[in-house]
Image (cartoon, rainbow, N blue to C red):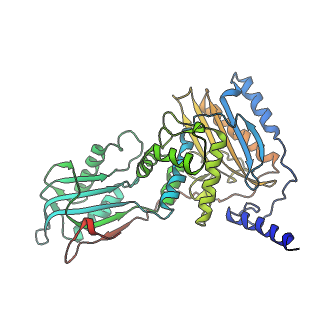
Amino acid sequence: MKRIIVLPLLLVLLRICIQEPGRSPGGEPYRPADEPRALRAVSGYIDIMQAGGKSPDEQGILIETFAAGQTLAALNPNVTFNPASVMKLATSLTALVRFGPDYRFRTNFCADGAVDVRSRTLEGDLVVEGGCDPMFSLYDVEEVAAQLSRTGISRVTGRLRISGQFYYFANGYHSNLSRETSATKLRAALQKAGIKINGDTGFGDKSGSLLLSHYSDPLVSILLFQNAHSSNAIAEVVGASLGGPEAIQNYLVKKLGIAESDVFVGRTSGLDFNRITPRAALKVLRTLIEVLAEHSLKPEDVMAVAGIDSGTLQRRLIRDDVRGSVIAKTGTLVSIDNGVSTLVGIAYTRAHGPVLFAVFNSGGNVKAYRRLQDQFIEQVIAEEGGALPPVRNQDALADTTRHSIIQVLYGAGTQPAETATE
């Protein structure tokens, strides 16, 4: 009798951990099928590919139930493909495991010289110790400048000296990752905000007394923005904070148990040359969901909801019967592997609750692939008894309010930066 009671209880708890996959977000239960069956949508998908002159050998599919890990569809699941920006899921997972979702990147501002409050002058260098904040921007500079002014500094007689890994965030990814460009943008923003710097801008070691520390938004918020907008700049800086592509590769192989032949991380953003199998991609996704659940978080806390959230998925899967029931990460590369389009995520269905899917396309027109992917996922959901109600109905990225923190440490006495407490 105890076994009969305990087993259903364990199943219920498992479902609750992952956004109650046994129920819709509105509480409506789904009716699980007795056994998963091969999806007819796959044969139609392959037929369309072949009719368009595309080889099935250049495409990959894997669809699994979340609860039992049963395969619903597979096409080259153990062949490596270029994941493009889907690699950002691996970067997100590694960052969450290493730092935790509440982690904030810290940037220190130090005075290497005496502060004359009467003349509002720092007689020396203003030293900025970067801590790999991937979203430090004009908003943050203005907040920092306001606090520096309150401490009695509006002029710096010396240099603006950059230490550590400092990045100034801007849209795009070509220029703002350069330390020289980041330093130039920071200087201009500080001066515009009222902090006049007499000396030049340079790079060197940190020294001096800690004036204040700026802490970024929580990591989980940064990752949602990164993945929803597929920001290469953010993913590259988050990756740098972890130790670069090698650190992601090592985590996937040594900790997650993915075979070395099944994954290659060339860039933490997914740019250029990367490789992963559909099966390994779903292992990354499944682990990401589990890690989030350990922190009472859900997949949509770091991934966009299709048809709802701003970013690359806002105008995809928008049909009324599926809108809001798919959480995913897109990937696009136009000039690599003759055109790459990928989609990896979760579809909430009535038959099996959350269904994990990985769709990898290469060697073709990325816009055409996106339309085909959407049609395919819509057909999969239909075969799975239809979609559960939307995960959410409002754009989670519409509110652009920042939640960074500034800790001012300069007061009656100054504190050496190297002894400042976290």
414 versus 71 height, above or below:
below
- Residue at point 43% right, 65% down? 403
In the rendered image, the vertical position of residue 365 relative to residue 126, given as above or below: above
> Quick check: can you spot residue 311?
no
Give the image location of residue 312, x and y in percent. Answer: 56, 45
x and y, in percent, of residue 384 in the image: 81, 49
Instruction: Report the quarter where the N terminus lies.
Output: bottom right
Nearer to us in this view, 319 or 81: 81
Residue drawn at x 77%, y 61% as measured from the top left: 22
Image quadrant of residue 61?
Answer: top right
- Compared across the picture, whether 205 is left or right of 331 comes to left
| Foreground residue among 327 and 416 | 416
Q: Quadrant of the C terminus?
A: bottom left
Q: Is residue 219 left or right of residue 31?
A: left
Residue 304, given in percent of the width and then of the height, sits at 59, 52
Residue under the image location 56 percent in, 56 percent down: 302
On screen, residue 21 above or below 169 = below
